[in-house]
Amino acid sequence: MIELTIDGKKIAAEKGTTILEAARQNGIKIPNLCFDKRLKPYGGCRMCVVEIEGGRKLASACGHPVKAGMVIHTNSPKVRRVRQSVLEFLLVHHPLDCPECDKAGECALQDLVFEYGKPETRFAGEKKHAPPDVRGPLIELISNRCILCGKCVRICAQHQGRGALGIIGRGFPSVVQPAFGEILECDYCGQCIDICPTGALISKPYKYKARPWFLEEKENICPFCGVGCTLTLGIREGKILRARGKEGVGITDGNLCGRGRFGFDNIYTEKRLKTPLIKQGDEFRQASWEEALTYISKVLQAIRKANGPDVIGAIGSPRCTAEDNYMLRKFMESAVGSKNIDSSEALGYANALKTYNLSFGIKNNPAALTSPLGKDVVFVLESDLSITHPVFGLNILQAKREGSHLIVADYRKTKLTKHSDAWLNLKPGTLVALLNGIMKVIVDRGLFNRENISKIEGFSSLEKMLNEYTPDKVSGIAGVSGEALIEAAETFAKAPKRLLTMSLSASENTKGLSSALSAANLLILLGEEPSSLQILAEYCNTSGMLEAGIMPLEDAKGVMDMLYNPGSLRALYIMGEDPIVNMPNTRRIIETLKSLEFLVVQDIAMTETAALANVILPASSWAEKNGSFLNSEGRRQEIYKVVDATGESMPDWQILRNLGLMIGSNLGAKSFEDLSKEVKNYLSQKSEETKKDIKLTFHPTHYRPEEISDKEFTYTMVTRDVLQHSGIMSTRSEALRLVQAEPFLEINEKDAERHGISDGYHIKITSRRGSVYLKAKVTDAVPEGVVSTPVHFSSGMINELTHISPNTCSRLDAVKIENVQNI
Amino acid sequence: MFNETVLKEIDEIKGRYPDFRSALLPALYVAQREFGWLSHEAMSYVARTLNLPEAMVRGTASFYSMFKHKEAGRHLIQLCTNVSCMILGAERLVDFLRTKYGMEPDNTTQDGRFSLVIMECIGACGTAPAMLVNTDFYDNLTEGKIEEILDKYK
Ligand code: SF4
Ligand code: SF4
Ligand code: SF4
Ligand code: FES
Ligand code: FES
């Protein structure tokens, strides 16, 4: 520690700290316009000048490291004079359009001028007068207001790993814009909007919506992915107008992705359900809560009476709170008397839990968002984590910047492959073969501790199985060269600190239980702890839902029965899920749902699945109720009612409690506080149970593809997430729809040429189960022979094509494509 | 697109620095040498070769005045008209280039043979007036001498 004095206050700071940071750590404010703690010091604005006693000149605090015994004055008359001049220079070019600038009132430049400025100026220079660039969907660039601090350029390139913006030109005419003045096409994370100290970068959906001083800011957890960022919501007259990230707030400390920043408006969709609806003939009619709940309770009781409770099932939601899901389980167990409860995560994160159990003998292995930091090697397994978990993706990039060796196995070009040290460009869905190949190299070269590891259960069968996975053979299957495989194996095996990380979700068909088991095998082989395997739960409350007990118990029915086995149930209660769009093999699901006598769907908005229901119940959205989400770290974070409920909607848990009472079962929870306490107790009890000794077991898994392309179905179809969306909910956001409103099929340039397909052409795509029509997106991001499509859009109905299989290496589908542009 | 030899040259440049960003200026210089000027394609290509964002490449290229962003003639004449050169008649030489060869500052002759750029001091005040033709340096210029020199550049 180094001791120094700032403004008469003796402080201590770590060696290498800058004066600015040391001051910040001690609550001393030094004004600045180009500093951000996420970025390297830049020294561009000179607002942060301070006086160091004995120094010849003033020093910029953001770039100057502390030295022992320094005596620093941050606010002396000299310093103030210089700052005043800096601002005076900035204002020579800056337009004084604060009256119509969204930023006014929370603008760093305005605030500093207010504090340091003086009324007259010694200079009369040219004002900037370029027209604003309004072409992009979400972000407007108003270069006249830009003070060229370069923060946006740097956050985008250094931190976001994107580099969409540059300072183009030199001197007065310099502007911030994309490379060649084209429309800004980027991640739309909006990090540049938050970081801009002026009104030069603004959010289009929020433009002219409210003066900042009229906004009430409230914090809430993002309702999309499993990262669980804190959104600072700006609310006016009961309506959410914007979301931003704030340094020091929440686990992600000011970082947000575009979904969280722009996607909250999905709660204002016209598809929102406002009253209960009862199906009459082919139409729905509005009903009162009383009528709808009485009706449901009567039918459920009749079915139970006639056939027993085992023909009734329920599906929970990774979007609903832990309290909602807890109540659903309680409702099913106590009011209905059935254990048939499951969720879409049966195809996703439930496989991670199974793996932890089988391979490590533990119930859970929550991720840690900062886990990539400080690792020598980070190995990403066929996962586009910058898309599924954007802010976790930032941590991977940060690790790489700080010196981690980044290996990425993926069939497609992604932001992570671009930043990787080694890209194992494998064929989609061949991860299991690749990992087996890597283990084979490790075993053959003796890169592991045979003496200890061979004692672990399953080792001999693993070793035997690996014989099939020589580099040559794996190279044939996965398309990765033998050398690359060996190099990756050596690098990973020899690294002192290493990490395997991946996502596992229903929307991705490239991975399955086997993929996670293989990853665990590799780590056990290397003598690693379970924490070296980071599988990120997909949605805001995937973990909380599973913890709340939405998982089929033994001898009960899971989704394979409830959604894929017509006749297995007579009544189904679906809360916050749209299986028809969101889960594979749509036709089979529709067939199964149609075989039901009674379907209840409870959701915030109308969905394809709800359209088949007998009764639809309107639920309040995440911003309209209290509750808690468990993020992918298993961290419980509370969410709050920040705006009024839409229409007559109610929180899911409340609907279920009321319905329970109708059926004659008191599920407790008189108030939310009651329920919250009960759930907290339940969760902490469960986490006590989870603390168990690790028991390692190898579960050798072969690479066994299910559907192989043949002469007719020549392409492999991959389903995946896109950056702007998260499940279906985000597709109801007007803002996010401005970037991506409809589904598309990515196809390699060469394949496109063969079919005469150009961007935007209509394509018919057919699998062994059905056909759908999509627009082509010609790209070099996917390899030849592979087409790829997002599943979020109900207009796409991609899952008409897909098939289901819960326990495999992958669920890829073989498809054929036809150019139908001119038909 | 760069040919094999140029790619090798850029690879060699990359090898000199721990960070590809440092290779940007030399790589842009190679691109300008190869294509004569930095078109958007040329800058995109440099970006891809160095795995850097296009915006960074353009931003850097646009900062340095010796990179050309317009198509240039086969030969680039950079004539100084700063103080020393001016006193020793550089303005007259500009007129001479104009009338004799049809050159205009910041423009290219119709036959695509010459582009003319007026420079600030190029550090040859002692032997002014001075100019660069491509990378060749000439000083103590007169009209006659210019004629002789330019004959060599077809
Ligand atoms: S929105 Fe994000 S990706 Fe786009 S320019 Fe801004 S920082 Fe870069
Ligand atoms: S747009 Fe904003 S953040 Fe970017 S350089 Fe200009 S003032 Fe700085
Ligand atoms: S979607 Fe995920 S990464 Fe993006 S803001 Fe929300 S929680 Fe954060
Ligand atoms: S904050 Fe130090 S120079 Fe800008
Ligand atoms: S003034 Fe022309 S070379 Fe210096």
Image (cartoon, helix red, strand yellow):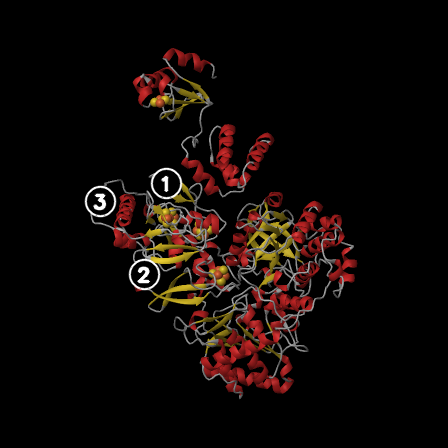
Callout 1: chain: A
Q: Amino acid at mark 3?
A: Thr
Measured as percent of width and height from the top left, residue A48 is found at: 34, 50
Measured as percent of width and height from the top left, residue B20 is found at: 53, 40
Q: Earlier in the sequence, mark 1 or mark 2?
A: 1
- Disc assigned to residue A121: 3
Element type at mark 2: helix
Q: Nearer the viewer, residue A79 or A343?
A: A79
- Disc assigned to residue A174: 1
Circles 3 and 2 in contact, beta carbons < 8 Å:
no
Q: Amino acid at mark 1?
A: Ser
Report the Cα–Cα distance between label 1 and label 2. 29 Å
Pick out the residue farthest to the bottom. Answer: A664
Q: Are marks 1 and 2 in one subunit?
A: yes
Measured as percent of width and height from the top left, residue B17 is found at: 54, 38
Residue bearing mark 2: A212
Q: Nearer the viewer, residue A171 or A138?
A: A171
